Image (cartoon, helix red, strand yellow):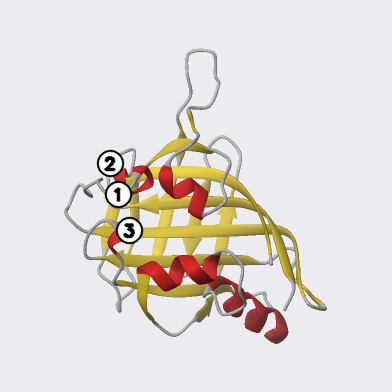
Amino acid sequence: MAWQLSGRSIELCNCRMLCPCWLGPEGQPDQGWCGGAFAFDIQRGSSDSVDLSGTKVALSFVWPGNFFGGNGTARCYIGDEAKTEQLRALEAIFTGKKGGLLAPLWGAIVSSWLPTEATKIEIGWGDSPSLSVGNVAHATLTPLKDQAGRPTRVEGAAAQAAFQLASMDLASSKGSRWSDPKLREWQGDSGTLHAFNWSA
């Protein structure tokens, strides 16, 4: 059952900066409901004997309110370069079926998983990080920085502990969109950038 993943990730949602759900269950999404997504660029990883290095995964969610309230619907997208055994391992990890931090988290806030899809996932880094997921999603992020060029960083937000993220850098994702035909379509401006290192 052992697995380990590390790399960089992007989060987007349909709110203005900063998504209030990060701050706890009292926060109210700007539109009264939450459409959100994560994308994971896995630099190093393995699940039992399966090497997962170099793979990519995206998750999309819709909640009727703040995500702490639960009752969410979600889908997992896996980069189409993944081999069959990698796809199976990534699906099990990212939907919480293989234990670790995601199992209790999704168990508390996601009530329905749509079928996993294999599709082209592209994640770019640098000064303007970007994300595209098949035909359903596209985003370009502009990291927020102070006058000296230092990133605008958040630590200690309530939801960061659930995702085991030590900190996150804020970014504008104005113009980002998610339009999976089985999920509520959304656009937004809120974005965050992180490094993750998970294991179970």
Q: Identify residue type, mark 1.
A: Gly
Q: CA distance from mark 3 to mark 2?
A: 18 Å
Give the SS element for disc 1: strand
Residue position for label 1: 188
Q: CA distance from mark 2 to mark 1?
A: 6 Å
Residue in the picture at 37% in, 72% down: 110
Q: Residues within 10 Å of mark 1 (few under 14, many from 20)?
A: many
Q: CA distance from mark 3 to mark 1?
A: 19 Å
Q: Identify residue type, mark 2.
A: Arg
* Residue 191 higher or lower than 7, as above or below: above
Q: Quadrant of the N terminus?
A: bottom right
Is residue 2 visible from the viewing direction of this image? yes
Residue in the picture at 33% in, 57% down: 177
Name the N-terminal-most of marks 3 and 1: 3
Q: Quadrant of the C terminus?
A: bottom right
Residue position for label 3: 68
Q: Position of residue 143 (x, y in %)?
A: 48, 34
Mark sitting on residue 16: 2
